[in-house]
Image (cartoon, rainbow, N blue to C red):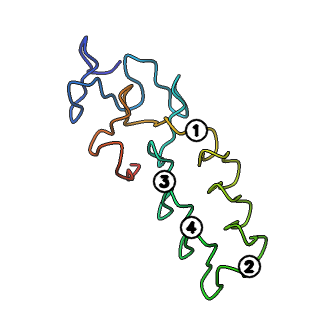
Amino acid sequence: VDTADSESHLETADSKSHLDTADSESHLDRADSESHLETAYSESHLDTADSESHLDTTDSKSHLETADSKSHLDTADSESHLYTADSESHLDTADSESHLDTTDSESHLDTTDSESQLTYTWAWIVIAHT
């Protein structure tokens, strides 16, 4: 696997077997055996969204721009739905565990290892996918 050694170390990776696109725990570009996703971390944060199902300028009460906790905007409902997101902080095809696309709540992709650590950041920090 490129320049990784028997512990799956890669340049900026630590002793927990980090690798650019795949570590010794069978990580794959889009999803490994732990279902990792590029910009999602173990709490399923996406870009500016947090575990309380915030999306862009919305808060956990389904606020969108000038919308209050009772107001619907576009397809969002009073349970903090935004577009196709549901009350559990779902986005697009995400499920009730705040999954995004094909990832699960334990998952990371690309620069993460089996310990859910990112190449440059820990699992509790949103990664900047390069």
Q: CA distance from mark 1 to mark 3?
A: 11 Å
Residue, disc 3: 45
Figure check: 38 above or below 54: above
Residues marked 4 and 1 touching at CB (< 8 Å)? no
Instruction: Note whether 74 is above or below 26 in the view shown.
Output: below
Residue that extends furthest to the top in the rendered view of this protein: 6
- Classify 10 Å Cα crowding around label 2: few (below 14), some (14-19), many (20 and above): some
Say whether disc 4 or disc 1 marks the residue closer to the N-terminus.
Answer: 4
Q: Position of residue 6 (x, y in %)?
A: 25, 11
Extreme residue in the bottom direction: 66
Label 4 vs label 1: CA separation?
18 Å
The tag earlier along the polypeptide, 1 or 3, is 3
Residue to which mark 1 is pinned? 103
Identified by mark 3, the residue type is His
Which element carries disc 3, helix, strand or loop?
loop
Occupied quadrant, residue 12: top left
Q: Is label 2 in a helix, a strand or a loop?
A: loop
Q: Earlier in the sequence, mark 2 or mark 4?
A: 4
C-alpha gap between disc 4 and disc 3: 10 Å
